[in-house]
Amino acid sequence: MNKKVNTLLFVLGATLFNILIIIVCFIVLFYLYINIISGFMPESVNSWAFIVIFIGSLVISFVAYRYAIKFFLSKIDAEKYFDPLFVKKYRKK
């Protein structure tokens, strides 16, 4: 495989990984809210809980994704296997 195919597969895999992390975080936070927290909260909070859980899962997944990508790129040489996504068209002389 060449660098462009490796880059495409990496981007697709990283995207799927990020979506999977979001779904898992959402399910875990929703489970925790339903089983633990909802007993202590009034009924009026339930409408806002879904929004808070969704935003919380996005934030947690963003942080986890950053650390996972940083760990992955520390283990391999990115310049050797991947093509740059953004290339400078003009070089300064």
Image (spheres, rainbow, N blue to C red):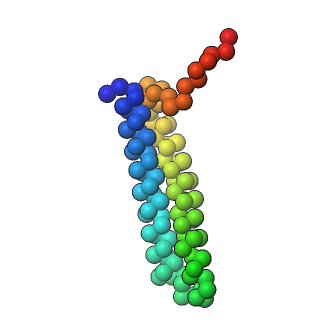
> In the rendering, at what x and y percent does residue 44 appear?
61, 86
Query: With 57 as the anchor, is 7 left or right in this view?
Result: left
Query: With 90 as the anchor, is 18 left or right in this view?
Result: left
- Which residue is depicted at the point 54% across and 74% down? 50
- Residue extending furthest top? 93
Instruction: Examine the rendered structure and indicate whether residue 50 appears above or below residue 45.
Output: above
Q: Quadrant of residue 21?
A: bottom left
> In the rendering, at what x and y percent does residue 71 appear?
49, 43
Q: Quadrant of the N terminus?
A: top left
Instruction: Examine the rendered structure and indicate whether residue 90 appears above or below residue 33.
Output: above
> In the rendering, at what x and y percent does residue 51 appear?
57, 71
Q: Quadrant of the C terminus?
A: top right
- Which residue is depicted at the point 57% across and 59% down? 59
> In the rendering, at what x and y percent does residue 91 appear?
63, 16
- Residue extending furthest front? 89
- Residue extending furthest left? 1
Q: Quadrant of residue 90?
A: top right
In-front residue for pair 59/44: 44
Query: With 70 as the anchor, is 8 left or right in this view?
Result: left
- Which residue is depicted at the point 56% across and 53% down? 63
- Residue extending furthest right? 93
From this viewpoint, is residue 77 visible?
no
Instruction: Examine the rendered structure and indicate whether residue 4 appears above or below residue 57.
Output: above
- Which residue is depicted at the point 44% across and 48% down? 15
Question: What is the total number of numbered labels drawn onto the structure image?
Answer: 0
From this viewpoint, is residue 38 visible?
yes
